[in-house]
Amino acid sequence: MNAISSASYTVAVRALCEFTAKQGDLDLRFTPSPTAEQGMAGHATVALRRNSSYQREVKLEGQHGSLQVRGRADGYDPDMQQVEEIKTYLGDLHAMPDNHRHLHWAQAKLYGHLLCQKLGLQKISVALVYFNIQSQKETVLQQDLGAGELADFFALLCGRFIAWAEQEVAHRSARDLAITGMVFPHATFRPGQRQLAEAMYKASTRSCCLLAQAPTGIGKTIGSLFPLLKAAAEHKLDKIFYLAAKTSGRQLALHALGNIQNSTPALGLRKLELVAKTKTCEYPEAACHGDACPLAKGFYDRLPAARAAAAEQQMLDKEGLRSVALAHQVCPYYLGIEMARWADVIIGDYNYYFDLYALLHGLTIVNNWRVAVLVDEAHNMVTRARQMYSAELQRDSLKRLRKSPPPALKKTLNSLYRAWLQLEKEQEADYHPHAEIPEKLLTALTRLCTEIGLYFADNPSQLAPDLQQFYLDALLFNRLAESFADHSIFDVSKAHGTSTLCIRNIVPAAFLTPRFAASHTTALFSATLSPWNYYCDTLGLPDGTAWVDVESPFSADQLQVHVVDSVSTRYADRARSVAPIVALMARQYHAQPGNYLAFFSSFDYLEQVSSSFINQHHDIPVRLQTRRMNEADREEFLARFTEDSQGIAFAVLGGSFGEGIDLPGARLIGAFIATLGLPQLNPINEQIKLRMDKIFGSGYDYAYLYPGLQKVVQAAGRVIRQTDDQGVVYLIDDRFGRGDVRALLPGWWDCKL
């Protein structure tokens, strides 16, 4: 929204209007709108209908005191002296809320003023051009306005904004000044922490990306936030985004920021936690509009006071944001979205910057922000990014829609269903990958998306949930189909008399590369980022990305690592593996009683070993991870690891207890890992292997070995959390005896065969 200097504040026309001219209710009723491509095509169509002197995308700027306003008018007809603000839409124009029209007029009038100023006009025609994507018809609303009247309107909006702008300039100046005197919140750096911090600062200095492999226990969170805050003033950073895969990661970041703030009280950082809407909604049964939710009614009328109050708060975590929002009777979630424009550090999930419709990436591009992005536990990024850029459709969902379809959609629903069935009939196996998406299927799906969108636009009160969900799934599928290439697989899976269509992303690099390019620096850090080329290749990190392998603060004599290569945990050998694993675990426990975690490749395997163990060793306390644990169950499971407790807890590798948990000291003294963690051997993973081999030449390693050993190292990392911890890890499988496998384990481990 802004570019700040010591003398002025620059704001876009659209942002200025959204800040000063929005009014009335928050209204998020489902109303299909044109896609970006349709919008651009609509603008082009309108321009082509104009005369040869018509000017498109007219660059404009103006000044009001210390406020500089910039923007691009959609069109200007010099013959008619008419400036046009073009809006594309679907459905009934009369259904458009009045507050939307009010905002559109504000934008058009500002462009009118800036044109009068630029061209020396005494008056101008200001027009709103509403273009219907479906009918291709224009509705033009026009006003003849004098330059003086428009100048007064410009001054009015700027006046409403300039006090805020001056406040933001003062906040930024004070923030940057305080940063120069900011001190590290602890007496000394932990071993390895300074090396990480220096790498972070240097990456910002070079404006490059960074992959940082840093052992658990060195304080990676504060070791990454502190140096980038230090860099913020010198490198003119507008924002720092701290992105975590789990709630626990966000909480660690908020705690670290609190410590930094306490050590430098003058810092005054605005810290914002973005939390999913489902976890912040005060009225989950109500729809998001003024007729249903009291916090949506008059939202924009109360937003200025709520925004001002929120800006005074340094810590806008979930509870802090909720407190401000409810005090002003506005929606906490959408107040948080608004405050993302004004916070210094934003903490949230990966999706806020990296997914297809990422809020923070969109704001960065629109507002030309200079941002630093920190990605915590970045070994999760490959899997998470694949999910972001994958889509699937269920034939059962389409089948349900055909039972009682709206008459206007019956024909296109049937057309897609026939194309789908034909694809199924041509497939003999339960799973089949296709080199491309069949044109007939895609054409039918695209046509259905168009017609559902038009149906919803014409019938806004008839939003059947099943139809709406299928529509949203289909839109995503279509969007990904437009960029379908070697980075993804299109496959059809058949089971139980139905089928699933999937665009399955394998290599998210093509989608993530623009995200990295949009940042000043992006630093990805984790205890398990080896080998570095796997992450560079799959995530699309740019040339020049720095790599640092932070020296471990732990020594080999702290962690005894035993390789048990006399046992195979392969599926065919599991029955034979149970007895020696049970004996090994009991022997270790009796030699050194305490808290242990035992990890297995699946719940079935876990249940086989735990059942035998319980039958043979009644004297050893046992607890089990179950298949459908909720958050309360997981917390209770972890709470039983105390300084005084003893026993063996059985868990699944790669699940809730294999990473992201902290059990220092006697709370955990050992781990048994009875698996290499390799992904399941199935047709989908075999296709991933083939595609990885085609692109990178390392199919098995990229599809199976590297992801598997990453989980092993993460699980083993639960044992040693502090510099004075002692523990033991057993790696149980004959493949751990191979040199190429051990080479992928942490260098400070002294593995004993």
Image (cartoon, rainbow, N blue to C red):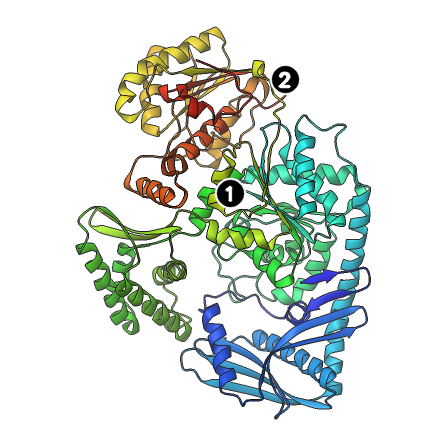
Please tell me whether residue 86 is drawn above or below residue 402 in the rendered image. Answer: below
The one nearer the camera, 310 or 72, is 72
Mark 2 nearby-residue class (10 Å; few <14, some 14–19, many ≥20): few
Q: Quadrant of the C terminus?
A: top left
Q: Are marks 1 and 2 in contact (CB under 8 Å)?
A: no
The label on residue 186 is: none
| Disc 2 target residue | 724
Residue drawn at x 27%, y 21% is: 573
The one nearer the camera, 153 or 561, is 561
Asked where in the image residue 64 lies, by quadrant, the reply is bottom right
Mark 1 vs mark 2: which is more N-terminal? Answer: 1
Residue 697, image x, y percentages:
39, 40
Please tell me whether residue 288 is drawn above or below residue 320 in the rendered image. Answer: below
Q: Single out the residue that lies furthest toward the bottom.
A: 79
Amino acid type at circle 1 is: Cys
Residue 611, image x, y percentages:
32, 19
Asked where in the image residue 230 lies, by quadrant, the reply is top right
